[in-house]
Structures are given as structure tokens and as C-alpha cells.
Amino acid sequence: MKPKVQDPTHYNKMDEYAVQKQSPTSNGSGATTPEEGEPSLKAIMAAISDLKSALEPKLDTVTEDVLRADFQKISDKISTAESDIKVLQTASKKLEEQVKYLTKQTGVLAARQEDQEGRARRNNIRVFGVPEKTEGPSVDLFLEDLIVNILPPKHLSKFFSVERAHRAPIPLPKPPPRTILARIFNHRDHDAILHAARTHGDVRLDNATVQFSQTLTSRDVAQLACGVSDYSPVMAILVAIVRDTGLPPRIDPWYLKKGDFPDRLREGAKRYFDDNLGSVTSEGILLEAFKTVIRGQTQALIGGLKKERCLKCETIEGEVSELEAEMLAGGPIQLHQYHNFLLKQQEVRDLEGNKACTHTLAM
């Protein structure tokens, strides 16, 4: 290695500084001059400049090394974070799929549990209003006697019996009395009892009104309590059918699914829907039943017109057919459309009753 060569000016400047420090002088005003022991400003600035020149390369090198090391650390951290993010994204996708699957399975299990609970309650009834301590030691025998003698249902089977019955397990309250919960042995007897309770009117026992009701699941009770039910759209369609067509007020959607329509919905057909009804909603099934009613009514009215129809009859028939086509085209049936349809039907009936039609005959 070559020996490090010192700057010759370095010694000159240091010697000058030593001479100035050892040779103090006075400027005549009492102030101390640089020759009296302090370096001159020029020497100080020169020393600072030399020091700056010597430190700048070193500082640049140190700064570059520090920045390079920091950048490498940050780059390594970003790479690690990206790798972790990819792992988390993969795990998140798997978790999302599992959550979707578990949510679907939970819904299926909840529906099955609801179905099983409903099936377990299908033979149960609730009896309200029976005065306390009237039933005696055996609630089931008392209830059998009450049903047979006070509420005589029609078509009770010879195997009718109350399998078990008890009061609601709550503390003895003030009026009204506790509810009696009972299980009927035969499901047909269960339906006959509820039908008799609906048609019989008030059932009196010791000046108390006794009421019979079916038992509902907690979900159905909660929906009834808040006034919202899964069957609300279906009930709206049923109300419209009952109001506008005069059909029986109780139409079980289950019978509609099976194709066992009431007589006024048959119109000579054995079956109106395919067997594959898994994706068909109850609203759609009732809508199709409603359209079936419209088709049957239209065919009956047009077929009942006289062979020699007047121009007005022809016009009304065309309007009825147009309304029918509009309502059967698809989508929900508007009530005002069906109202106009019923008005045209009434006009057809009026013309049908006019046996001696005085209008100009259609050519």
C-alpha cells in the first residue's frame, strides 16, 4: 500500500494558526485582535471548507449504504407481505366457499327441522277457555267427552281418542285459564275437530267460551305476531280470487300442487301442471289456477251465446277475448283488468238473457 500523502497546505495553515496564537498584539482600542490568541476568520472559514470537503464524500457513501439497506429491508417486507396476502386470499376464498356451503346447509337443516316440528305437531290441538279444575283428574278423558258431547264433529272415526292432554305448564294465573294442549290419535279426527270448531260457532262450557285451535311452530307464531308471513303473497292472491270469482275461501296450495282442483277449477281437465314443481312458487301456482278460472269462464260465456248473435254480442265477445289474452299473456294479473273482464261478462249474461234479440244480426 502507498503511504497516505498529506496535503502540504495543511501544515502551513496549522503553523500559521500556532504563530498567531503565540504572538498577541493590541489594536489600540483595548479590543483583542486575532494576533493575540484567536485564529482569523479567514482561517476558520478555510478550515470549515476543508472539513466539509473531506466529509461530503464520506457522508454520501454512508447515506447511499443506509438507503440501500433500508430499501432492501422494505423490499423484503413487501415481498413477505405479498406472499402472506396471497396465502390469506386463498384461505379467504376457501372460507367463503365453506361459509356459503354451511349457510346453505343451515337453511336446509332449519327447513327440515321446521318441517319435522310441524309434522310432530300436526295431530296437536289447543283448547282455550276451559275453566280451571273443570277437567278433574284426567284431562284426556275430559277432553274426549267435551269433543263428543259439546262439539260433535262429523265423520269421527271409531278409533277416536285423545292420546294425551295436559294444561300449559305455567303457574296458575288469574283469568283467562291456562290452555289445554292435547294430541289426537288420528289425524282425520284432528281435522274433523278443527272443522267442527270453525263451523259450530261459540262453544259454551260453564258460561265460558271454549275455542279450539291448531298448534303452530315458533317460527309461524313469530311471523303471525309481526304480521308478516311467507304465505302473505299467496293469501293476497287467494283473497282476490275469493272476492272476484266467488270460489271457496279455503284453497289449500297443496291440492293445487297435486292437481286436485275444486270442481270450479277443473273445467274438464284432469291435470293442469307438470309433475316437476320444485322451482315453481306458490304464487305462480295460484296465478296459473287463477288463469284457469278465467279461461273456463270465458269459454263458458262464449259457448253459451246464441248462434245468431247480434253485432253487439260479437263486439263484447271480442272485447272479452282481448281481455282474456291480455291477462293470460304473462306477469301478474291486475285487479282492474279482471274487474273490466267481469263487467264484460255481465254484459254477455244480459245479452244471453235477451232471447228475442232486437239488434241487427251479424252477417
Image (spheres, rainbow, N blue to C red):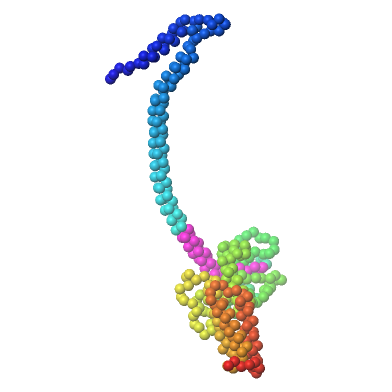
- Residue 72: image quadrant is top left
- The quarter of the image holding the N terminus is top left
Q: Which quadrant does the C terminus fall into? A: bottom right
State which quadrant residue 243 falls in.
Answer: bottom right
- As displayed, is residue 182 above or below residue 353? above
Q: Residue visible at 65% across and 92% down? A: 359
Between residues 75 and 157, which one lies in front from this camera angle? 75
Is 127 colored magenta in this rendering? Answer: yes
Percent coordinates x, y for residue 221 in the rendering? 59, 64
**Which percent across, then down, holds residue 339?**
63, 78
**Mostly what secondary structure, the magenta segment?**
helix
**Of the pair 78 and 55, the residue shown nearer to us:** 55
Instruction: From the viewer's perspective, tell me whether residue 339 is left or right of residue 114.
Output: right
- Furthest residue to the front? 28
Q: Residue at x 62, y 60 (%)?
A: 170
Number of numbered discs: 0
Q: Residue at x 35, y 16 (%)?
A: 6
Visible in this render: residue 262? no
Q: Which residue lies furthest to the right in this view?
A: 207
Q: Where is residue 203 in the image (x, y as percent from the top left)?
A: 67, 74
The percent position of residue 129, horizontal first and vertical second, equals: 67, 68
Q: Which of the pair 26/128 is nearer the observer?
A: 26
Residue lying farthest bottom? 356
For image coordinates 44% across by 10% down, the residue present is 17
Q: Identify the magenta region.
A: 103-130
Q: Is residue 213 visible?
A: yes
**Relative side of 334 to 46, left or right:** right
Give 77 or 261, whichever is nearer the viewer.
Answer: 77
Q: Is residue 71 above or below residue 359?
A: above
Instruction: Tell whether position 118 is magenta.
Output: yes
